[in-house]
Amino acid sequence: MILYDADMPAPNPRRVRIFLAEKGIEIDKKSVSIIQGEHKAPGYLAKNSLGQVPILELDDGTILCESTAICRYLEALHPEPSLFGAAPLQSAMIDMWNRRIELRLFSTIGMYWVHAHPFTAKVVKQYTDFGKSNFKNAQNIMRWLDSEIGGREFIAGDTYSIADISALCSIDFAGFIGIPVPEECANVLAWHKRVSDRPSAPA
């Protein structure tokens, strides 16, 4: 297997790297430079027509795209420690929270990145007013998350999971592009400290 990877601060490749680190899995990696546009080169587009990173290429040439799908495949190969839940209800809760993080938090941060950040202005047509509106939207979602996770150690309950990985990468990327966690979000900030202290977090 080969993981087509991209360096920090790219959040989606980092999700897979943290997942691998939590599992203790070592696989070959091939670096793809987003800055240099290698993800849009013909050879890469032949593997993933959307030009997104990461992808996992299996030994038989099969290509898996999308971070969560890649992690689910790796979970099936290496079920311990479970990061998608070991029991039906736990699995459903983790799926629910991972989906919420992806659709509400990460997508909102992404809209700010695409439509309001100076870096992406060089490569896409920006709708700046829409982009800037997502700064406030992202922080409001962080406030909502803060109200939801009080009394829990991790995003989906008492167990570290893919939902924590997705949330960590989302919030760290938000900070990188200039969207901080609001100071009053004590639960989110405490959670962020806990998961950032894990050995896998620098992956």
Image (cartoon, rainbow, N blue to C red):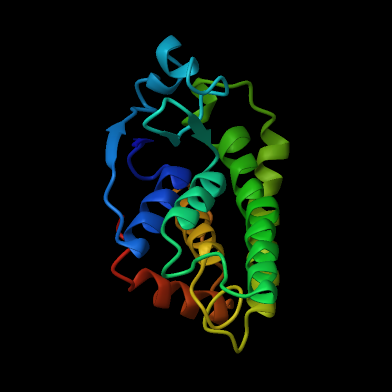
Q: Which of 116 and 144 is in front in this view?
A: 144
Q: Where 13 falls versus 189 (above or below)? A: above
Q: Nearer the viewer, residue 84 or 157?
A: 84
As drawn, the residue found furthest toward the top would be 42
Whole-percent x, y for residue 143 in the image? 66, 70
Q: In this view, does 85 lie to the left or right of 26?
A: right
Quadrant containing the N terminus is top left
As drawn, the residue found furthest toward the front would be 60
Residue 91 appears in the picture as rendered: yes
Q: Which residue corresponds to the image point at 59% horizontal and 34% vertical from the top-left?
A: 114
Whole-percent x, y for residue 176 in the image? 43, 50
Whole-percent x, y for residue 150 in the image? 62, 85
Quadrant containing the C terminus is bottom left
Whole-percent x, y for residue 47 in the image? 48, 21
Residue 201 appears in the picture as rendered: no
Q: Which residue corresponds to the image point at 63% horizontal and 51% vertical from the top-left?
A: 135
Q: Which residue corresponds to the image point at 47% horizontal and 80% vertical from the top-left?
A: 190
Q: Which residue corresponds to the image point at 41% horizontal and 59% vertical from the top-left?
A: 78
Q: Nearer the viewer, residue 82 or 119?
A: 82
**The quarter of the displayed image where residue 144 is located:** bottom right
